Image (spheres, grey):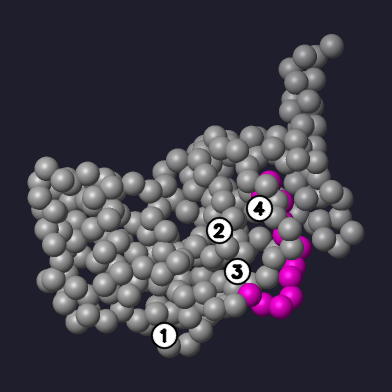
Amino acid sequence: MDWTKAKTILIVALALTNAFLLGAYLMRGNGRTQVDQDIMRAILTDENIFLETELPKKPGRMAVLYVQPEITDPARVGEVLADQRTLPYGERTDEALLAAADAVLAGCGFLTENAVAAGPPVQAGSRTLIRYRDVFNEIPIEESYILCTLENGQVTDIDRKWYAPLALHDKKGAMMEPMEALMQLLPARNGEESLIIRQMELVYWINPEGLGAESPVGDTALPAWKIVDAEGRETYIPAFE
């Protein structure tokens, strides 16, 4: 037997099999075949996409969220920053810094029930950064945030882009499996190097190409899968089937 020829035939056969499975997945929706989770994972691996995180659970049916962009008043922020208390050097623990940021945000009227600290304070040279997420029904609203910068025991800057949640649409739609969302990464791969997925979560996503944060007009946040790779790049996949 010509083993070189046999190996070539096997490689071609495997490639055709992957192409068939991928085609079956991409055609799903018009009577297309349900692709098994393990097969989808194998296809991702063949395309050098690797998961280093647990996949979140698929939620039940969801609706879009109506939100309202909020305009920040620089004059009011300036007044609150000027009136704040300076933390003594020996008292600048993470808890005290977070409390100081909370107090400033409360004074500005920004500390609503939806403003949740994204984690502990982060040191960046001589500065301390505290980021807040906009959370509705335990689901973050992406492209909506507050970033407080502290130096020498005081909040020195507030970077804010905020959308106040208003109401959910009265109609709900079926949601996509997380693995199916990852498959949406394939068409744009073009033989790129390995892509390592470090985080995946369900969010409400406001497309930044839509209305700006300073617009007085309401906007719509769609359920989406947020995917973060090892390089910190973020990709949003709309989560409706």
Q: Position of residue 41 (x, y in %)?
A: 69, 37
**Going from the N terminus, do you reach mark 2 or mark 4 first?**
2
**Going from the N terminus, do you reach mark 3 or mark 4 first?**
4
Query: Going 15% across and 59% down the picture, which residue do you hit?
Result: 154
Regarding residue 100, the answer to whether it shows in the image is: yes
Query: Type of residue at label 1?
Result: Ser
Few, some or many residues within 10 Å of mark 3 (<14, 14–19, 20+): many
Q: Name the residue under label 4.
A: 181
Q: Mark 2 points at which residue?
A: 138
Q: Name the residue under label 1.
A: 215
Query: Type of residue at label 4?
Result: Ala
At numbered mark 3, what does the secondary structure look like: helix, strand or loop?
Answer: strand
Eye-nearest disc, 2 or 1: 2
Eye-nearest disc, 3 or 2: 2
Query: Going 80% across and 41% down the picture, which residue do you hit?
Result: 36
Query: Going 37% across and 59% down the picture, which residue do you hit?
Result: 132
Farthest residue, direction right: 31
Instruction: Look at the magenta stretch and give its main secondary structure.
Output: loop
Quadrant that contains the N terminus = top right
Query: Type of residue at label 3?
Result: Leu
Q: Name the residue under label 3.
A: 222
Few, some or many residues within 10 Å of mark 4 (<14, 14–19, 20+): many
Few, some or many residues within 10 Å of mark 2 (<14, 14–19, 20+): few
Query: Going 63% across and 46% down the picture, which residue do you hit?
Result: 56
Q: Do the residues labelled 3 and 1 touch (CB within 8 Å)?
A: no
Cα distance between the residues tagged 3 and 2: 15 Å
Cα distance between the residues tagged 2 and 1: 26 Å
* Residue 129 horizontal side relative to residue 184, left or right: left
Q: Which stretch did the figure color magenta?
A: 168-179
At numbered mark 1, what does the secondary structure look like: helix, strand or loop?
Answer: loop
Q: In the rendered view, would you say 239 is above or below 10?
A: below
